[in-house]
Image: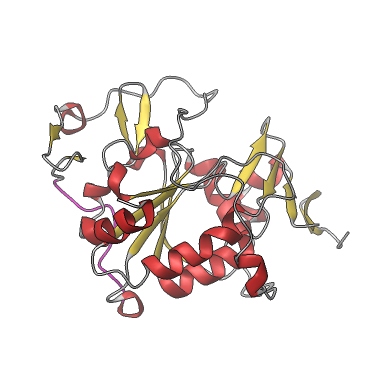
Amino acid sequence: MRDAHQCSGTGFEDFEGSVIVRWKVLLSPKCRKKTCKCHRKQVSRSALKQPRSCNIFKALFCCLKAQDEPKPPTPPPSHQALLEAQENGMVVKQSEYSLLPEIEAQDQGKICVVIDLDETLVHSSFKVYVMKRPYVDEFLQRMGELFECVLFTASLAKYADPVTDLLDHCGVFRTRLFRESCVFHQGCYVKDLSRLGRDLNKTLILDNSPASYIFHPNNAVPVVSWFDDMDDAELLNLLPVFEELSQAEDVYTQLDLLRGH
């Protein structure tokens, strides 16, 4: 096990592909550390060809996990408006402003990928520790090269922001969006892609919860929920899929091809 990075009497440990972050570190802004050191590992071609344990486009049914926080305040009227169903099966809503800033020069022409945090990249348990999913470092490194990456989580910023500081060593995420950027719809926090300020045919979402992308299911690349299986290779096996999607002129067309439609 590597030496823990000490911080105000608490620790951050990285071992065997997993991460444990003590809760005090997560809540203390003084404990946030950003480093440009990328721990890169070579991924063999044979590894990328390993069969996945579950079809990535298998429909997943689960809702966002219950939180201890009190029920959120009533959202603005614009969030309560009825959402119009479109002929193509997507549900979209026009927004008054964009959640994302203007596209940076280095991301011009790239597809925007919205990436979830909990049970997609990490797993937290009883607000005590956070474990990194296997191959998350390699996955984020490559995704940052291919796409404009945005972290979008239904978790609160006071938890998710420090965790992302520790997870995203190289600044892959151009923007971080938290619970307040979600739409509270029928008891779930939904990530409304139409509010990002990006063309929907150039936008993807990677999330373990279908409830999160219920407004835009045709933009989704589902991922199996992860909790503690250190033999999991879901992120590694998704890389060839995203390599192909990164070249798409229209994500709907390319996703249909990958789904076999």
Residue 75 pos. (x, y %) = 26, 28
Q: Where 167 sits versus 63, above or below?
A: below
Q: Is residue 117 left or right of residue 123?
A: left
Which one is nearer the viewer's eye here, 157 or 236? Answer: 236
Q: Residue at x 70, y 46 (%)?
A: 131
Decide whether the magenta segment is chiefly helix, strand or loop.
loop
Residue 249's quadrant in the figure? bottom left
Q: Where 185 sits versus 239, above or below?
A: above
Residue 245 pos. (x, y %) = 37, 65
Q: Residue at x 30, y 79 (%)?
A: 105
User: How many numbered discs, if any?
Assistant: 0
Residue 213 pos. (x, y %) = 34, 40
Residue 178's quadrant in the figure? top left
Which one is nearer the viewer's eye here, 3 or 48? Answer: 48
Q: How is the image coloured?
A: secondary structure
Q: Which residues, given as a range, are shown in magenta?
A: 96-104
Q: Is residue 158 left or right of residue 229?
A: left
Which one is nearer the viewer's eye here, 64 or 169? Answer: 64
**Magenta span includes 101:** yes
**Magenta span includes 153:** no
Residue 228's quadrant in the figure? top right
Q: Where 214 sits versus 131, above or below?
A: above
Q: Is residue 198 visible?
A: no
Quadrant in the picture for the N terminus: bottom right
Q: Where 159 sits versus 166, above or below?
A: above
Q: Residue at x 35, y 79 (%)?
A: 106
Question: Outermost residue, front direction?
Answer: 260
